[in-house]
Image: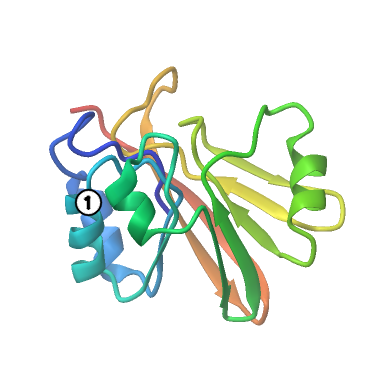
Amino acid sequence: MLADTHVPKRARDLPAPVWAAVGAADVVIHAGDWVDTALLDALEARATKLIGVYGNNDGPALRARLPQVAEAELDGVRVSVVHETGPAAGREQRCAAAYPGRDLLVFGHSHIPWDTVAPGGLRLLNPGSPTDRRRQPHCTFMTATFSGGTVTAVELHRLPRP
């Protein structure tokens, strides 16, 4: 899972460990703020399956190719992807109301990794950013494993500072 890549504004390309994870993944999820269509093209070419949405920093070319909200079912897990969820305070309740019947919501925007469960069981994941750590100690991305309709494992990957 990726978000807030901001390529080529914050980095020329994704870090090598991210590309390695893309190559190993069955599905790549990107929660917006790509900035340029070149990264979308590259991920589409290298990912087995790509699910993505546009973010607030994505212009008309990306918005023409990506939805604001994406939905998929992955090994029985009902997934929604969106860029923004609003402020951290009240996020779980707000998202549970906005995405009823979903098991997992992947979001971005803040560049802050997030892993919580809302009332009713909706899991919320923000992978942070692999290219722009902002106030975080590390740039990050996430991987997850799904099995039998549940999220069985989530790992936050911290990238070394360049």
Total count of labels: 1
Which residue lies most toward the left here?
Answer: 12
The residue depicted at 13 percent of the width and 37 percent of the height is: 12
Residue that protrudes farthest toward the right in the picture: 120
**Structural crowding at the residue carrying mark 1, measured as other residues with C-alpha within 10 Å and reported as few (<14), some (14–19) or many (≥20):** some
Residue at 78% across / 41% down in the picture?
94
Q: Amino acid at mark 1?
A: Thr
Q: Nearer the viewer, residue 17 or 39?
A: 39
Left or right, 138 with respect to 10, comes to right
Whole-percent x and y of residue 84?
A: 57, 39
Whole-percent x, y for residue 143 in the image: 45, 57
Q: Quadrant of residue 123?
A: bottom right
- 143 or 31, which is in the foreground? 31
Q: Residue at x 18, y 28 (%)?
A: 162
Q: Quadrant of the N terminus?
A: bottom left
Residue 43 is left or right of residue 32, and the answer is left
- Secondary structure of the residue carrying tag 1 is helix
Q: Nearer the viewer, residue 46 or 115?
A: 46
- Which percent across, then down, holds residue 107? 55, 46
Q: Which residue is mark 1?
A: 37
Relative to 80, is 83 above or below?
above
Left or right position of 122 against 75: right
In percent of width and height, residue 72 lies at 56, 72
Quadrant housing residue 19: bottom left
Against 35, residue 101 (above or below) is below
From the viewer's side, name the closer residue of 151 and 122: 122
The colour scheme of the drawn protein is rainbow
Is 154 left or right of 122, judged from the image as shown?
left
At 76% from the left and 51% from the top, the residue drawn is: 98
Q: Is residue 105 above or below residue 150?
A: above
